[in-house]
Amino acid sequence: MQAFDAVVIGAGPAGLNAALVLGGARRRVLLLDGGPPRNAKATAAHGVFTRDGAPPVCLKTIGLEDLAPYPVSVLPGVAREARALPQGFAVRHDGGWVQARRLLFATGVRDILPNVPGLRERWGRTVHHCPYCDGWPNREAALGVLGSGQEGHHLALSVRAWSKRVTLLTDGPDELTEEQREDLARVGVPIFTGPILRFGGVDRVDVRFRRGGRLTLDAVFLNPTQQQNSTLPASLGCELNEKSRVVVNENGMTSVRGVWAAGDMTGAPQYVMSAAATGMIAAVSLNTTLIHEDVRKFGAAFHKSPGEETGEPPSGGEAS
């Protein structure tokens, strides 16, 4: 098997930045690129330093190009299996098995969208997840928030910061407390509790209700349920929390020795810049453990000056 210092699984912002940092630290890295990023359907990514408004697919293309000077191999495909070895890990991908001293997962999460006909087709275009990413293009627009209870209340108040025309769509009983209803009333957010029949429209969202009636909006925001995009962290024994996020410490270390995780899969704030930052933190931590391991294994060699074993002068120098 080919051997690497680290295998980074996932090529979103977290995985790309982790591979960049590790490659820059002169580590031999394999980056497994599992395909388009989760936000590939979005037309633009906002809040991205120096790249505000760039399409997510373009950000990934630039990120991959940045790896070219470094000892980073990029292969398409996903990791199919991972096993712990006495000295590291074995990972099976679409091209076979490789060996790694360390693993860094950046496989992200998968959005589980509400079962509303027409919603999936508009995901990333007129139906959005994050107001910090898509609020500015929809400022002062007629916006809907699809949700109920605490999540619907919180997201509606958040979206209200971008537009005064916000409607909460609960698609059934609202599950709001009296205090939450008062909050929404104070800022002029009406509540529509009617079950939704379907979403239509092209450039706008035409909301049809099961009991009749319709509502036309410029865009809709929601907080979808999410699940891990990869089962491998769990199969290796990594601890998950009650929301199925991989539990990590402040350095991105999981509960399994030699395994790190970064990005959305850890419950980090789901922004491009946040994911990239966690990728760097995890990569620095991972590399630090490799440095100390190298010192323990090969430390004696570090104390020998060039030519000490052979008696020859260093290359380019002269014998005294």
Image (spheres, grey):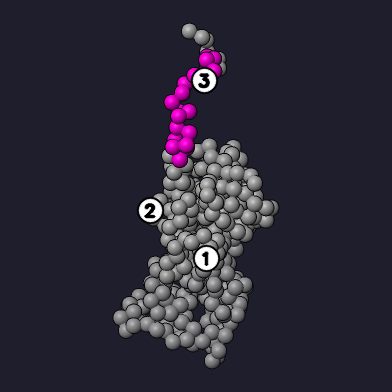
Above/below status of 48 relative to 65: below
Residue designated by label 3: 309
Q: Single out the residue that lies furthest toward the front.
A: 86
Give the residue type at disc 3.
Glu
Disc with the residue nearer the chain's start (1 vs 3) = 1
| Region in magenta | 293-313
Q: Single out the residue that lies furthest toward the top.
A: 320
Count neighbours of disc 2 (C-alpha within 10 A) and say few if under 14, some if 14 to 19, many if 20 or more.
few
Q: Residue 128: image x %, image y %?
A: 52, 68
Q: Residue at x 46, y 56 (%)?
A: 256
Q: Residue 225: image x %, image y %?
A: 49, 72
Could you say whether the residue bearing mark 1 is in a helix, strand or loop? strand
Residue in front for this viewpoint, 315 or 108 = 315
Give the residue type at disc 1.
Gln
The quadrant holding residue 70 is: top right
- Left or right: residue 296 versus residue 196 is left
Q: Residue at x 41, y 74 (%)?
A: 151
Q: Which mark is residue 262?
A: none
- Left or right: residue 68 versus residue 239 is right
Residue in front for this viewpoint, 319 or 242 = 319
Count neighbours of disc 3 (C-alpha within 10 A) and say few if under 14, some if 14 to 19, many if 20 or more.
few
Give the spatial CA distance, label 2 vs label 1: 20 Å
Give the residue type at disc 2.
Glu
Q: Is residue 311 magenta?
A: yes
Residue in front for this viewpoint, 89 or 106 = 89
Above/below status of 274 relative to 240: above
Residue designated by label 1: 228
